[in-house]
Image (spheres, rainbow, N blue to C red):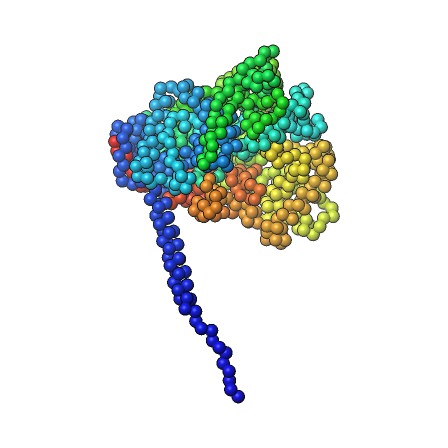
Amino acid sequence: METVLPKQKPKRKWSRRTLWGVAILLLLAVAALIAFNLYVTRSLPETKGEVTLSGLSQSVEVIRDAHGVPHIRAKNEQDLYIAQGYIQAQDRLFQMDLSRRQASGRLSEVVGEATIEKDKYFRTLGLRRAAEASYNQYSKEGKAVLQAFADGVNLYIKQLQKSGKWPIEFTLLGYEPELWSPVDSLTIAKYMAFDLGGHWEDQAFRQYLLQSFSKEQAYDLFPSYPENAPYVISKEELDIEQSFAKAYIPNQFNGSNNWVVSGEKTESGSALLADDPHLGLATPSIWYQMHLQAPTINVSGVIFAGIPGIILGHNEHIAWGVTNTGPDVQDLYIERRNPENKSEFLYAGKWKKAKIIDEPIQVKDGKTIDYQVTVTRHGPVISEFAGASGKNTVLALRWTALDPSTELEAVLNMNRAENWDEFERALFKFETPAQNFVFAAKDGTIAYKANGKIPIRKKGDSLLPVPGWTKEYEWEGYIPFEELPKTINPKEGFISTANNKVIGDDYSYHISHNWAQPFRQMRIQEYLRANKKLTVEDMQRLQMDEMNLQAKEFVPQFLHVLNGSVGVQEEKALDALQKWNYIDNKGAAAPLIFNLWMQEIGNVLFAEKIPEETLKLFGGRKQAEDQLLRRALNGEPGPWIEEAGGLERVLMNSLQTTLKEIEKMQGDNVAKWSWGDYHQVRFNHPLSSVSPLQYLFNSDGSIPVGGSSVTVKAASYLNDGTVNHGGSWRFVIDLKNISESYHTVGPGQSGHVKSKWYHDQADDWVEGKYHKTVLHNPEGEKLVLKP
């Protein structure tokens, strides 16, 4: 039998060519990647050798230590601040330019249509107008420092103009930054006052509640029951939902921890001070660490990129830190507009002409928008930036930060202060934002002061918008400087603040309705009271503390309420909570269940009744939710919980929804659930939202992290679990050896993606590792700036 072999297919002649083609494409891709890498790397700043700078009178030495902290030593202050501006620009120029553009309402010039509404909002607020007015209030010395700093920034910009070696962000967006001005620095400072808030949005939200719900429902969400019936306009007069749908609201968790301990409670016998401001977590860090030295000054700490001096830190005699006081420094005034002349508003029986300011907004690849801002006697009309808000009624904003102020003068004097008296005198010019300052000195003094301009009102207490057509609700000055809350050398041996209520009910003046949830402050005080012979390491451990006192308060009570028939999965989840030690450990399941459960409780109560865009105005939401739960657990449920079916149903419905969401993310095995699989920090770069740039700027990816919004180790997060807010800078110092201090700047010092200091502290931030910074004889890469 003849065997028939199958016919073999002829080899394709082009298969070898295909392989060669693929290989060539791969080589070209690799070559392109190498070329791009070299292109990005070419803009790395010089950190070693010598650079000639016009404007310097003498040589300046800059040593960057192992973590990229620049130690600048100059022979006079003029050269010192020129060098500070130059060095900041080396590491953070794109951040500086973006910051001044955002605060000035000029992002659309380089970004395009996507930022038009944000630009309208900041043009309306007028932070740059306030900065321009402030500049004229500065002393000759203050103006000289601002100008020297601007000169230093501009020396670096001019170098880049000649070399063309711009940081890659400028190339990607296709523009070159303008030269720096002193007003740019002051505008960024005004933005920080904005970021730390003043509660106008809470007033708008309460007005919305009164217009949209019953009095009982509205008052159930007020921070306190109004003594007198609040002023309410008719529902048709003002559309809160429409007016502020596109408002840019600061993070409600913007705040901080700080504390100071006297030598009586420390191992060294000298005071300890710790500070960790809670702001956005991003690349680059909002903070820039520096050490400035001249014959008249030797100060170390952090500053916002784009501003001279050191705002938080220490010198050879004292150390200081801040948290946000959170006072009511903003009031919404209901203004009645003349139906026949839209630029006139009623006041004291007469129509008064408002100021109309042209604020044209240039748009990249688009037409310039003719935009106007209306400013009444109380401030800018902020209810119309997104369109018409009502018939003949608008809301204007009165805010301390829109007045001229000279915070930089205060910073310069703080940097030179040698004792509490000198430091407190320096604070006199630190008017906005109002801050809780803690202080320690080598002489053993520890002190605290809530500092800033906090208004005294003729009538009303900032709960709601007030009539702007009468003189009854005007401000009549500010809390006197000498009467602001203050403590010096308390018997307890320590002072701490965590955005908590800082005064007793007997205090003579109104400060705020909205204080932070008390859990961080409670834990800090619990720790400091329980321990003696405290050390730097103890302070660092406390800053990284993950104990959740909110859970400790509510979990046992929730378990008691739900102590009945529940499903199998609910029983497993409740069992995990029963066995929990209340530490928000990234490897545990219980923190995931509890934190998402608390979040879902709020959704059950509000999501179907209040639009999402309006809920963002609810600045005191977390505190209000805690109060609703406390009252219900005490047998006094309010209308929100009653209308949702009662406490047991609220807890069960929210728990079941929470567990279903977790199952989608991490499966149905409760034992394998992990807080850190959901709760992760990314340190996102502003351009990383544009794909595929995230692979360039966020190459480290996500890092699991413990803690939460209510732990001392602050780590607030978005709905997808992304940790975007917390202690962006951590600082501890023992005044026994005041020439040394301990810091973490997450994710690193440099804004250049190819710098070794770009993300070198990201893991340190998560794990609680600190680096030591010294005032004398620093070691590292040396750059000499020559005249």
Q: In which quarter of the view is residue 391 placed?
A: top right
Which residue occupies the foreground of this view, 732 or 335? Answer: 335
Q: In which quarter of the view is residue 611 placed?
A: top right
- Residue at the extreme top of the image, as rendered: 349
Residue 698 percent across, percent down from the top left: 45, 45
Residue 66 percent across, percent down from the top left: 36, 42
Residue at the (55%, 23%) spot, across then down: 381
The answer to whether one can see residue 337 in this image is yes
The tally of labels here is: 0
Residue 60 percent across, percent down from the top left: 28, 33
Q: Quadrant of the C terminus?
A: top left
Residue 605 appears left or right of 490: right
Residue at the (42%, 26%) spot, across then down: 186
Q: In which quarter of the view is residue 548 placed?
A: top right
- Residue at the extreme bottom of the image, as rendered: 1
Residue at the (25%, 29%) spot, across then down: 58
Residue 234 percent across, percent down from the top left: 67, 23
Which residue occupies the foreground of this view, 755 or 491? Answer: 755
Which residue occupies the foreground of this view, 483 or 433? Answer: 433
Residue at the (41%, 28%) spot, across then down: 184
The answer to whether one can see residue 700 in this image is no
Q: Is residue 342 above or below residue 256?
A: above
